[in-house]
């Protein structure tokens, strides 16, 4: 009993320390967003004396955040749709068919996790230029689908190995073909891992700065990170506007996580350890 109580106290203390580590930067972030530039320089980490809520409005208007939100939402949504469809369909035969061919395909997808993106920046730029996809949303969406497929296939394959094959055998007896079985029976069961794929990849795509910087030069095509970057300069940066824009840009991700959090852990655990 005493050992259990000690373990509980230690766990509570560790959780408290972790909570402070997380909360303190958030409090600093929020305090900076509502400070004037002068107060920001005078007392960066102190709570504001005057709350400048107009910083959010000014950041929204100055950085054209509505356009940036639309671009980020469009790119993220279509990229996620593409990666879910391609990864789920690719993982299904890999998990179910035992052969050298499917094993080779799985290793091919896993190899994609190990290749760093900077190695492919120049070849991708030449390819997109040849296809006339530079400075287009379609080109960036195709890149995001390609770089997020390997990890998504890994999660889907691991999860599918834990789904009983008897479900497909029963569907086959009832006259369902492989495609219908996958779409009507298997894919709905993959909701937890699909939530994990959506959350992990949406974080990558929504917050990415490098790919839009390289392949989306036009101002009307820039995403949230590029809009935030517009507040920086060679000699001066408006930190109040930067932090205000960061808070505005992070809200959709927070809402997405809150909506899918019940499925997120199930999908990560199921996709990572089964099989």
Image (spheres, helix red, strand yellow):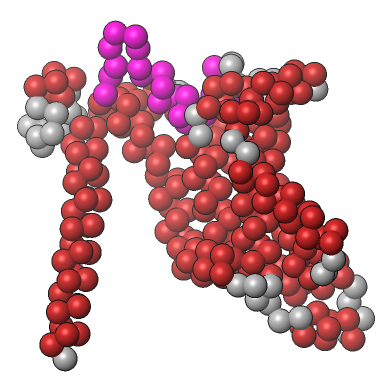
Residue at left 18%, top 53%? 20
Quadrant hosting residue 6:
bottom left
Residue at left 50%, top 29%? 209
Q: Quadrant of the N terminus?
A: bottom left
Residue at left 59%, top 66%? 271
Magenta stretch: includes residue 58: no
Q: Is residue 119 left or right of residue 91?
A: left
Establish if 231 lies above or below 225.
Answer: above
Quadrant hosting residue 231:
top left
Which residues, given as a range, are shown in magenta?
A: 219-239
**Residue 27 seen anywhere in this rendered image of the structure:** yes
Q: Position of residue 163 (x, y in %)?
A: 68, 77
Q: Is residue 20 left or right of residue 64?
A: left
Establish if 232 lies above or below 187.
Answer: above
Q: Nearer the viewer, residue 93 or 205?
A: 93
Q: Position of residue 74 (x, y in %)?
A: 61, 37
Quadrant hosting residue 243:
top left
Q: Quadrant of the C terminus?
A: bottom right
Which residue of the protein is positioned furthest toward the front in this rendering? 100
Establish if 180 lies above or below 111.
Answer: below
**Residue 66 seen anywhere in this rendered image of the structure:** no
Magenta stretch: includes residue 237: yes
Residue at left 17%, top 85%? 3
């Amino acid at each position: 009993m005493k050992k259990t109580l000690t373990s509980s106290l230690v766990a509570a203390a560790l959780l408290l320390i972790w909570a402070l580590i997380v909360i303190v930067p958030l409090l600093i972030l929020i305090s900076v967003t509502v400070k004037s530039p002068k107060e920001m320089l005078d007392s960066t980490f102190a709570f504001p004396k005057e709350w400048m809520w107009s910083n959010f409005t000014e950041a929204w208007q100055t950085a054209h955040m509505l356009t940036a939100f639309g671009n980020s939402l469009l790119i993220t949504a279509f990229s996620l749709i593409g990666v879910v469809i391609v990864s789920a369909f690719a993982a299904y035969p890999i998990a179910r068919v035992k052969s050298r061919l499917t094993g080779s395909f799985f290793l091919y997808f896993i190899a994609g996790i190990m290749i760093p993106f900077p190695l492919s920046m120049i070849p991708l730029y030449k390819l997109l230029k040849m296809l006339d996809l530079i400075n287009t949303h379609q080109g960036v969406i195709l890149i995001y689908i390609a770089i997020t497929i390997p990890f998504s296939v890994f999660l889907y394959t691991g999860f599918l190995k834990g789904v009983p094959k008897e479900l497909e055998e029963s569907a086959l007896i009832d006259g369902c073909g492989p495609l219908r079985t996958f779409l009507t029976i298997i894919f709905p069961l993959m909701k937890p891992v699909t939530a994990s794929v959506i959350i992990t990849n949406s974080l990558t795509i929504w917050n990415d700065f490098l790919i839009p910087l390289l392949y989306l030069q036009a101002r009307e095509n820039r995403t949230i990170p590029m809009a935030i970057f517009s507040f920086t300069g060679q000699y001066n940066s408006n930190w109040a506007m930067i932090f205000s824009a960061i808070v505005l840009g992070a809200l959709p991700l927070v809402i997405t996580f809150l909506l899918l959090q019940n499925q997120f852990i199930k999908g990560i655990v199921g996709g990572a350890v089964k099989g």
